[in-house]
Amino acid sequence: MESYDYIIVGAGSAGCAVADRLARGGRHSVLVLEAGGRDTSPWLTLPLGYGRTFFDPRVNWKFETEPEASLGGRRGYWPRGKVLGGSSAINALVYVRGQPGDFDDWAAAGAHGWAWRDVAPVFDDMESRVAADGRRSGNGPVFVQDVSDQVHRVNRYFFAGAAALGLPGTEDCNGASFEGATTYRINTRNGARWSAARAFLRPARRRGNVTVRTAALVERLTFEGGRATGLQARFGRRKRRFAVRREIILCAGSVGSPAILQRSGLGAEETLLSAGVTPKKALPEVGRNLQDHLGISYYFRATEATLNNQLAPFAGKLRAALRYALRRRGPLALSVNQCGGFFRSEADCPRPDQQLYFNPVTYTTTARGTRTVINPDSFAGFVLGFQPTRPQSRGRIGIVDADPATPPRIIPSSLSAPGDSDAVIAGGRLCRALLGTDAIGNLIEAPMGPDPRRLSDEALLEDFRDRSSTVFHPVGTCRIGTGPEDSVVDPALRVHGIDGLRVADASVFPSITSGNTNAPAMMVGYRAGNLILEAA
């Protein structure tokens, strides 16, 4: 049985960062176990390639939720990364730290030491910010690129519409001002996706003390008394056991980490017994506190050429490919989410409560044999979408049985908190007002579906129930807190009542951050590594 100082389960956004920190100095042996494969596909490098990985089971868990009565009985599709780099290898690349108040909320909820003043220096340390002209600030491993000089010119309509409503603008929502219309920063370097595997894991492996094993499904952890001593993993038909001398760090994400704890006998007794697992320690909050952003998009034919006109024709695809190959620039080097920002739906909101996306492209999803492909439409079009930033609804995740290949039951409980419906209506009203400005109105040729300009508040909410979907930000299922009655881990990310075991990924968020969650997930992993080394 192999033995290591540290074992990290999950090579995603947080797990790669933990590995990088623990590998420094070469003092400790580190094993990283990843259920997916290696990140060698060119679609994982090409920024716009996530349209090809969105439904690809080779790199994507393709989870589904339970049917939700609040959403018309629909099942939600939850893509999550199943590859080195995790979801940072297949996401839409947008880099958003979150509002300072988000992290102050964490501290107020019992995550002492995780306030904005505590985490801001961690972001600063891990980032390298690259301006549009190539100037670089910061020396961290995570590259954050300003692509404002490359985005499509049709985006000007969005900025003009926001200005017409008196909405603020900001050069960078990760800078001095979080609020306002902006071009989103993305995780690319020299035109290529800069996933957590590229930023953290590859440098860590070069230090010689990190071992990475892929295609490793962790069945359960092993214990002696109240201490984690190792784990058992499945590699195809083979099972192997690994021993740990210091600590196991679960970084399997908001779906995977609670499921591993539950399969190991840590969780709510009723969940464990119903899955045929013998309870080891009662931790009722494992799998609870599930939060996610729900969003909706409105589609329009445009009066001016958009990315559709560039990427739909074969000749346009060829030109974009050549431009990318020669200069690493152009639409293939960008995210589909080019601009948007964070706004107050009402002037008296204490802080921004809505995130908007303006995309200069519309697309159609088609099935081709066993593959599902996303392609731009053949006519000019654009998308305006929104998501309320701080939903109050709380769901849960629970295993069905002890088999790691069986997907857990995901119950988001969307719109179960009364205030969330009000937030949806507020976001719909904001989009309605933007679309009603002359600036954006001049871009609209015709709606391609429900048009907020023609919908009452009640109809906005009903449309949201019919069409909204996750924006792929699940968090909170192993939250930080003060004790086992209200949380799963303490502020040092140690699992309550179990020595030698921590959780470090988006599942520890006490509450969801206001925007895209990849950046704060990497921050959690980066800081977790520092906390572990300080305690070593």
Image (cartoon, helix red, strand yellow):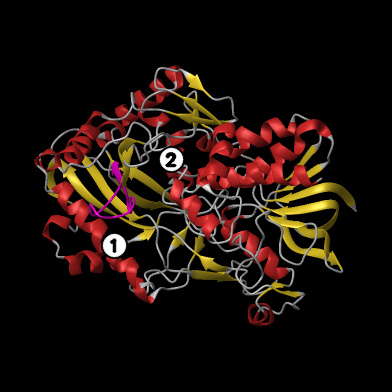
Locate residue 416: give its quadrant. bottom left
Amino acid type at mark 1: Val
Q: Name which of mark 2 and mark 1 comes first in the sequence.
A: 2
Locate residue 260: give its quadrant. bottom right
Is residue 388 visible in the rendered image? The answer is yes
Residue appearing at x 85%, y 47% in the figure: 4
Residue appearing at x 60%, y 30% in the figure: 141
Amino acid type at mark 2: Val
The residue stretch that appears in magenta:
343-358
Position of residue 427 measured from the top left corner of the image (x, y, whole percent)? 26, 56
Instruction: State the mark number for residue 94.
Output: 2
Mark in the foreground, 2 or 1: 1
Q: In this view, does 27 lie above or below 285?
A: above
Label 1: which residue? 424
The local crowd at label 1, few if under 14, some if 14 to 19, many if 20 or more residues have their Cα within 10 Å, is many
Q: Is residue 521 above or below residue 303?
A: below
